[in-house]
Image (cartoon, rainbow, N blue to C red):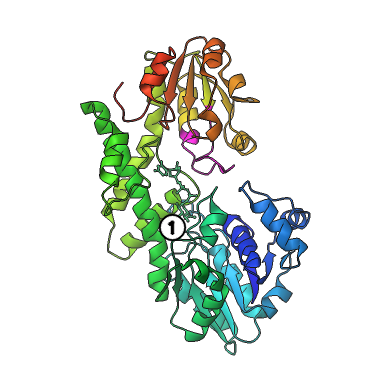
Amino acid sequence: MRVAMIGTGYVGLVSGACFADFGHVVTCVDKDQGKIESLEQNIIPIFEPGLDDLVATNARDGRLKFAIDGAEAIRTADAVFIAVGTPSRRGDGHADLSYVYAAAEEIADLIEGFTVIVTKSTVPVGTGDEIERIIRERRPDADFAVVSNPEFLREGAAIDDFKRPDRVVVGTDSERARLVMAELYRPLNLNETPMLYTGRRTSELIKYAANAFLAMKITFINEMADLCETVGADVQQVARGIGLDNRIGSKFLHAGPGYGGSCFPKDTLALVRTATDAGSPVRLIETTVAVNEARKKAMADRVVKALGGTVVGKTVGVLGLTFKPNTDDMRDAPSLDIIPALQAAGAIIKAFDPEGMDEAAKLLSNVEYCKGPYDAVTGADVVCILTEWDQFRALDLDRIKLLMTAPIMVDLRNVYKDAYMRARGFVYTSIGRPD
Ligand code: UGA
């Protein structure tokens, strides 16, 4: 199959490279000339484990190409994927669909023969209808079908999630489009991936419902963690105790500083707006959004408390800045709330993150970015773990103790255990576990 992938952001690039690896001929199209030139030299604009090799191999074998002008690729494509950004619109939290509709117009002018137009971007219910209307209006003669095919990739595990997904959701009423989609995903038959065919609006909503449910699950365990601290219970044991019930499941029950990233905050907000506009409010999700926002802001208080009530003139050594490990993505990371709150309270910040510091430097000011974890804790009055990168699980704690002015750790990801830290002479605070 011939595929044109419009947008080489996170979703477009990973999906394009994986479809090429499935044996299809893929052209990834992006208006950003610098990005395309870099990709042609195998310079990947994001940090995603395994992606550089996947891009290099498939580009070398001629299955993966890059282009600024998508005309040729769109004209000859069996399927054109729209994988452009849908950021939160400033002011009202609705998804900004201007890039999606601009792509639809471009596609309309170029398609030849039967073409399946697929939304990979996360788009609100009804967007597929609008894309269809735009294309039909510009090209009454065109032979096409608009399909919703949401992605469920996690950053840091995206290639595996694409190649071994729990399910693939395809929203279309067109039998011809369904055959094209089945062919595109045929290699997944080998590992018996469920293909779920639904109506287009249903598929669009499945994506939001999935992300909202996961965000709600995290927020639930975060509130349980607060309750555990108050009543003297252990949230990790609560998570295990409920997670072993198959109806609940053990995943996404890690208490922490609140969810961040490019998806959950944006998608929960967009779902709230869609539901409110439709006159069918989703109150659980409204509450999830509010609780999570408040939580991220409240995390700084834990550091203040650990230092006895004031951080004025104190140095906080921050380990981890990205919203989760194995990514350089800083979007809506809890660190973006916690660090400014600590600075406002008078703290001096030193920080280290294995991949996120370039991005962080654009978003956070007055932070001393350090070469490594030991550099970041040198002279610090407290060390605060914000992201659970693997390298922070095996720190030389004796060395850290010697480098700090006092051995105090605030562990917002429950990387360590209280008894273990206490035995090493640390004053240790974590999330939802008895002190
Ligand atoms: C999320 C979903 O997991 C993907 O299925 C989805 O495709 C993607 O959004 C998207 O819509 O594009 P992602 O944002 O990459 O993926 O990251 P997650 O691993 O889901 O983590 C999101 C946030 O929740 C992070 O800040 C993480 O630290 C937090 N989290 C996650 C917890 O605090 N506790 C948990 O148990 C799990």
Task: Say whether residue 74 is left or right of residue 11.
Answer: right
Q: Position of residue 131 (x, y in %)?
A: 51, 74
Task: Say whether residue 30 is left or right of residue 203.
Answer: right
Other-residue count near label 1 (Cα within 10 Å), few / some / many at <14 / 14–19 / ≥20: many
Q: Position of residue 68 (x, y in %)?
A: 73, 64
Name the residue beneath numbered marker 1.
94
Answer above or below: position of 261 versus 6.
Answer: above
Residue 304 vs residue 58, the one in the foreground: 58
Query: Is 363 part of what is drawn in magenta?
Result: no
Task: Say whether residue 358 is left or right of residue 169.
Answer: right
Circle 1 — which element?
Answer: loop
Answer above or below: position of 246 versus 143.
Answer: above
Seen as rendered, the residue at the extreme bottom is 141
Q: Is the C terminus in the top left, top right, bottom left or bottom right quadrant?
A: top left
Q: Main secondary structure of the magenta part?
A: loop
Q: Position of residue 295 (x, y in %)?
A: 36, 36
Residue 86 appearing in the image: no
Image quarter for residue 203?
bottom left
Residue type at mark 1? Answer: His
Query: Is 335 part of what is drawn in magenta?
Result: yes
- Residue at 57 percent across and 43 percent down: it is 327
Residue 129 appearing in the image: yes
Q: Which residues fall within the magenta stretch?
A: 319-337
- Residue at 53 percent across and 32 percent down: it is 320
Image quarter for residue 400?
top right
Residue 17 vs residue 23, the one in the foreground: 23
Q: Position of residue 176 (x, y in %)?
A: 51, 85
Seen as rendered, the residue at the extreme left is 231
Residue 191 vs residue 327, the one in the foreground: 191
Q: Is the N terminus in the top left, top right, bottom left or bottom right quadrant?
A: bottom right
**Mark 1 CB lies closer than 8 A to ligand 1:** no
Answer above or below: position of 348 versus 215.
Answer: above
